[in-house]
Image (cartoon, coloured by chain):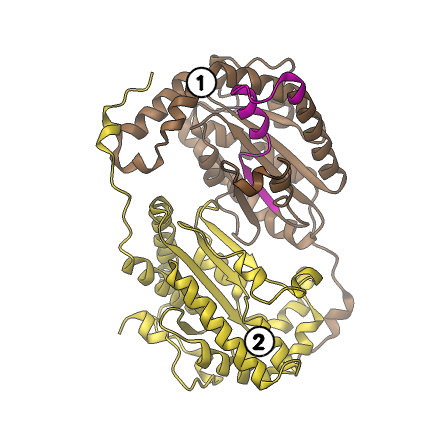
Chain colours: A brown, B yellow
Amino acid sequence: MNNRDQFRAKHPLKLTESKAGAKPLSSGDKEADKARVDELANRIAACQDIFYAERRRKLLVILQGMDTSGKDGTVRGVFGRLDPLGVRCVAFRAPTIDEREHDYLWRVHREVPAQGQLVVFNRSHYEDVLYPAVHGLIDGKECARRYQQICDFERMLSETGTVILKFFLHISKEEQRQRLQARLDDPDKHWKVDLNDLKEREHWDAYRSFYQKAIDKTDTDVAPWYVIPSDSKTHRNLAIASIVVETLDAMKLAYPPANPEYLKIKVT
Amino acid sequence: MNNRDQFRAKHPLKLTESKAGAKPLSSGDKEADKARVDELANRIAACQDIFYAERRRKLLVILQGMDTSGKDGTVRGVFGRLDPLGVRCVAFRAPTIDEREHDYLWRVHREVPAQGQLVVFNRSHYEDVLYPAVHGLIDGKECARRYQQICDFERMLSETGTVILKFFLHISKEEQRQRLQARLDDPDKHWKVDLNDLKEREHWDAYRSFYQKAIDKTDTDVAPWYVIPSDSKTHRNLAIASIVVETLDAMKLAYPPANPEYLKIKVT
């Protein structure tokens, strides 16, 4: 089974604590697995020059997950070898007043990749269903409407040339506890502490339940969801990098054809 | 003499062919120089986490130079180790209709760094003096007005917390000839060929003369110009990376202070 099939969301999705710790791609040797991640990250970087040269395809990677699930670490570990000219990482934070006065897809649409670009969304329009749903700001009917709007939006992006990969970084509640505690215990990491994360943690079950529903409702063949066990950082990166490489391979990237006329030109 | 003083533009600026080939930081051993570039690039990457954590300073790097002078290569060689979360590279191309209908600083202003961000401009607002001046689309009076506008704009950015470094990548006309020819001779590089570059090359002397003037008029202590001999790619990167590291060192970056209250929290 290829990696994309293996990690593709199953429906109805059940996000269990034990699945978060799975390591299906592990070789049993952590150092070897880390080396494999490096190798894949280098392959992604190597593809980028051709991807850019082609100026044809667009690649959008969406990272979602609970606080501390490793979205930043994924950017660093999987996309950190890319030439800064060819990758753009967009972190969506709490919307500004201006953004709130537009529809929730407005700020997202502005950031989607152009031809030859690879863009990584660190959080995305999915926050605009999850957060209000968990906090009771929108009802089930409005949730359903937004799922449909998101599917329509993503289908349009796909039909106009964007390849979309959506990753849910699945960590267990215990793993989150340890990661939050580690930040609090290390004075050098205090700048990363957001006490809101501790409050949001109280809604863990609600978030999990809404994530299950959101993924069930928006997992489509043109914008698939991959559920990535993420208690282990190495194996999270290994799974994501494997899927990205498989996707790039399937594109059969190639440099644009040469122009025989150019070979005759002498620069003076 | 420190690197910033050494490469700072001298006035009136004389861009000679021979200066483009200088290697003032060379150790005489090219492999050692390359290793030094790697070391400096890693130091820049290491500073980035603290720079981001501080959320206080903003760093804007502007790269200018003739076609093929190595702006892309500089991004890759000097800033390629940075976490994609912390660096943003903006390539300004020919303005769109929308952009042309605004003042020339409009699209540039939108892209300047926010607190904790490092942004690299691959070309910039300087193109909006050089190109029209070389092609006779604006007269000397309008040129002078734009130089003043640019100085005012950059001073405002500086006064509001942005550190600005402007690099002129200085190549010789012969080096450009070789680089253009190499692209034409290599079918895999044909996608990079832009026949306009050959036409712009005919205006070499006018570009050099306007660059000299532009640098003379806009080299200020808050937004200094560094003239980088760039016939050698390694020594170009070595000079630029040295200046960036020196600038970051001078900032005395430090993680924000820890919060003693955080050490008492137990996550449940």
Q: Position of residue B36 (x, y in %)?
A: 35, 60
At x 72%, y 55%, the residue is: A256
* Snapshot quadrant of residue B202: bottom right
State yes or no: residue A121 in magenta.
Answer: yes
State yes or no: residue B7 in magenta.
Answer: no
Q: Relative to residue A197, is residue B67 depicted above or below?
A: below
Q: Secondary structure at mark 1?
A: loop
The reply to the same-chain question for discs 2 and 1 is no
* Residue matched to label 2: B129
Q: Is residue B30 visible?
A: no
Q: Is residue B202 visible?
A: yes
Magenta part of the protein: which range?
A: A118-142
Chain to which mark 2 belongs: B
Q: Residues within 10 Å of mark 2 (few under 14, many from 20)?
A: many
At x 45%, y 55%, the residue is: B79
- Cα gap from disc 2 to disc 1, whole angstroms: 56 Å
Horizontal arrangement in the rendering, residue B235 relative to residue A118 (left or right): left
Image quarter hosting the C terminus of chain B: top left
Q: Relative to residue A222, is residue B115 depicted above or below?
A: below
Q: Amino acid at mark 2?
A: Val
Front residue (pair B4, B214): B214
Q: Position of residue A30 (x, y in %)?
A: 41, 28
Q: Secondary structure at mark 2?
A: helix
* Residue matched to label 1: A172
At x 64%, y 67%, the residue is: B183
Front residue (pair A201, B201): A201
Q: Position of residue A260 (x, y in %)?
A: 77, 66
Q: Position of residue A9 (x, y in %)?
A: 62, 20
